[in-house]
Amino acid sequence: MKLTTKSEYSLLALIYIARHEKKGYIRIEDICQHYALPKKYLEQLFLLLKQNRLIKTKRGVSGGYKLAVPPAKISIASIIRLMDGALAPTESVSTYFFSHTPLEKEAKIIKVLKDIRDYIADKLEKLTLADLV
């Protein structure tokens, strides 16, 4: 598993929104300025987050973005899977994105990779946005 900027920026933005939840809707400019993120790119990521019902949007002067579900119900694993796909080091041991690979011919390496997948998935499934705020 390697995080791309899609996951990194999405995590940062969602943490920022969760941290400032009491303020209501958060402006994308505030998030971009705080973390030095490109606005156009973050807007694209927010479309995906909105389509997957993780955030809500509101237009207008008092508009912006807010979480659609409580931060305690958003696992870090779900955000990474949405943005980057499998948490597993190879698709042949992935639970959600399984695909055959030549590594399957070596049972011992597959066992090690499954252990790695299980450790990462366990940690990230239990970790929520609320834990990071």
Image (cartoon, rainbow, N blue to C red):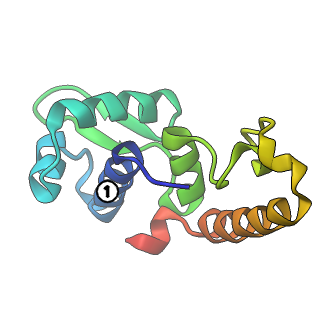
Q: Relative to 85, is 121 on the left or the right?
A: right
Can residue 113 be seen in this snapshot?
yes
What amino acid does circle 1 point to?
Answer: Leu
| Mark 1 residue crowding within 10 angstroms, few (<14) / some (14–19) / many (20+) | some
In percent of width and height, residue 64 lies at: 23, 37
Residue at horizontal 18%, vertical 50%?
31
Residue at image position (78%, 69%) is 112
Residue nearer the viewer, 69 or 32: 32
Q: Residue at x 42, y 71 (%)?
A: 132
- Residue 31 shown left or right of residue 82 in the figure: left
Residue for badge 1? 12
Q: Quadrant of the N terminus?
A: bottom right
Q: Indicate the quadrant containing the C terminus: top left, top right, bottom left or bottom right.
A: bottom left
Q: Which of these two is toward me, 5 or 111?
A: 111
Residue 76 location (% of width, % of height)? 53, 59
Q: Is residue 26 above or below residue 42?
A: below
How far from the left and from the top, in percent, is residue 45? 35, 34
In the displayed structure image, the side of residue 30 where residue 131 appears, left or right: right
Residue 75 visible (yes or no): no
Judge left or right: residue 96 versus residue 20.
right
Q: Compare residues 29 and 104 and report the one nearer the observer.
A: 104
Q: How many labels sit on residues?
A: 1
Q: Residue 102's image quarter? A: top right
- Under circle 1, the secondary element is helix
